[in-house]
Image (tube, helix red, strand yellow):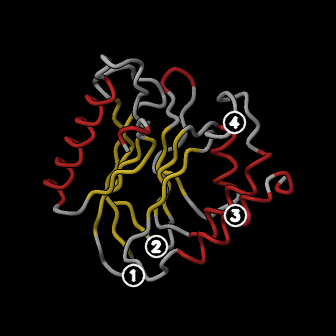
Amino acid sequence: GFQDYPEIGMRAEKLAASYPKEAAIRVMTYNLLADTIGFEGSDARSRSEGVCKIINAISPDAIALQETSRRWYACVINNSRYKLISPLRTGILGTMTALAYDPLTLSPLISGDEVFRSGNSSPLRRMVWAVFHHKSNGVTFAVVSTHLSITQNERDTVPLMQALELCELARRLNAAFNCPVILAGDFNAKKSSV
């Protein structure tokens, strides 16, 4: 239970207190399996209360989620007000990169889910996006949730090619909808490149 991760509760309270509530658009990203082992094998229940406490305390308009297993999907959907852009799919055509939104603040106008042309097209390596209308301030904006490949060696260009594809999608969305595009997710950047 949550008592096994008391630092998550303290972090949630600090983050919620420091986060500007008057921000026009509030987007967060969360890699849900970053602290656990395996995908479907890890038990989301041990961290779900803390994760949902953080999400609910910060209360973003949209959340880019990475490594969203069926268990995590159920935890987030059942313990918060957020809805996913598209239902979680499992199996060979599944996706573990997701985009959730607060239906109290946002209306999705159009959405999509694209695999990268470069590298593997696993359930993780994709771009899930939506163009939203903010109900209270009228702002239209796009959010792209992604999870780039990990650099395997110095000659590996797959993450760079995926980053270029991500930028290409952002340019297309910006041109088509004349709105800002927020890129969020797990970019797997090396510490030396940050």
Q: Amino acid at mark 1?
A: Ser
Q: Is the C terminus in the top left, top right, bottom left or bottom right quadrant?
A: top left
- What kind of residue is marked 2? Thr
Instruction: Give residue 144's position: percent from left, percent from top.
Output: 35, 49
The percent position of residue 72, horizontal first and vertical second, equals 66, 43
Q: From the viewer's side, name the closer residue of 15 and 121.
A: 15
Q: Residue at x 40, y 66 (%)?
A: 107
Q: Is disc 1 in contact with disc 2, using a CB cutoff of under 8 Å?
A: yes
Residue 165 in view of the camera? yes
The span from disc 4 to disc 3 (Cα, nearest Å) is: 18 Å
Q: Name the residue beneath numbered marker 3.
A: 53
Mark 4 vs mark 3, foreground winner is: 4
Amino acid type for the residue under numbered disc 3:
Lys
Q: Earlier in the sequence, mark 3 or mark 1?
A: 3
**Disc assigned to residue 136:** 1
Classify residue 78 by image quadrant.
bottom right
Horizontal side of 52 relative to 172 (left or right) equals right
SS at mark 3 in the image: helix
Q: Nearer the viewer, residue 73 or 120?
A: 120
Q: Quadrant of residue 41?
A: top right
